[in-house]
Image (cartoon, helix red, strand yellow):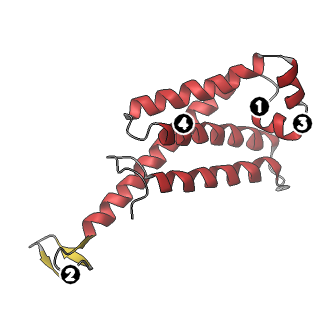
Amino acid sequence: MTHGPVRPGRPTTRQLWHLIATIVIAGLICRLAPLGLDPWVKKWSGSVLWGSLFWCLSALLIPKGSRFTQLALACVAVTGSEILKLVHVPFLDAMRMTSIGSFLLGRHFAWLDLLAYAFGVMAAELTGAAMQQEKKITSKLTEVTPKTGKLSLLDRSNETHI
């Protein structure tokens, strides 16, 4: 059973959903849990995770896109989310007055947030590439034999099954 298209240097759809869940949980913990974190840590860790989340979403939206296309989409979308803070219409302002609206939309535009988002996008890109590298290494160590359909370890030195 496959879990999304396999792309060179890219995580699978299943891995992306796991990464999204991890990012969301980490974001909720660092922003909302009473861990006694310094306000600076809460603010910037959340911003980095927000950028990482947008990279995951772009990888899900265009799974066969090039790395550049996915990175560009993530950067444009996360920048748009920050620019949205400059838009003040009754509907958005009313949403920002709620806890969830404030959490998701934010209230104040900050140029430095864009830098934190870019760092998060790049961190997620590197994490995604590392996840795929791990998968490549594991797949080179195992293979399904054509005759039996069973999984076996390969000895690449002489290409015989162990």
Residue bearing mark 4: 121
Give the residue at x 78% y 46%.
Answer: 31
Label 1 Cα neighbours within 10 Å, binned few <14 / some 14-19 / many ≥20: some
Element marked by disc 1: helix
**Residues at badges 2 and 3 in contact (C-beta under 8 Å)?**
no
Q: Earlier in the sequence, mark 2 or mark 4?
A: 4
Label 3 to label 4, Cα distance in Å?
27 Å
In the image, what residue type sits under mark 4?
Val
Label 2 to label 3, Cα distance in Å?
59 Å
Q: Earlier in the sequence, mark 1 or mark 2?
A: 1
Residue bearing mark 1: 105
Q: Is residue 80 left or right of residue 40?
A: left
Query: Where residue 132 sits: x, y (%)?
Result: 38, 53
In the image, what residue type sits under mark 3?
Thr
Q: Is residue 137 left or right of residue 103?
A: left
Picture disc at residue 148: 2
Q: Is residue 44 left or right of residue 125?
A: right
Label 1 to label 2, Cα distance in Å?
54 Å
Element marked by disc 3: loop
Q: Is residue 46 above or below residue 76?
A: below
Q: Nearer the viewer, mark 3 or mark 4?
A: 3
Label 1 to label 4, Cα distance in Å?
18 Å
**Residues at badges 3 and 1 in contact (C-beta under 8 Å)?**
no
Give the residue at x 39% y 65%.
Answer: 1
**Residues at badges 3 and 4 in contact (C-beta under 8 Å)?**
no
* Residue 50 lies in quadrant: top right
In the image, what residue type sits under mark 2?
Thr
Q: Earlier in the sequence, mark 3 or mark 1?
A: 3
Q: Nearer the viewer, mark 2 or mark 4?
A: 2
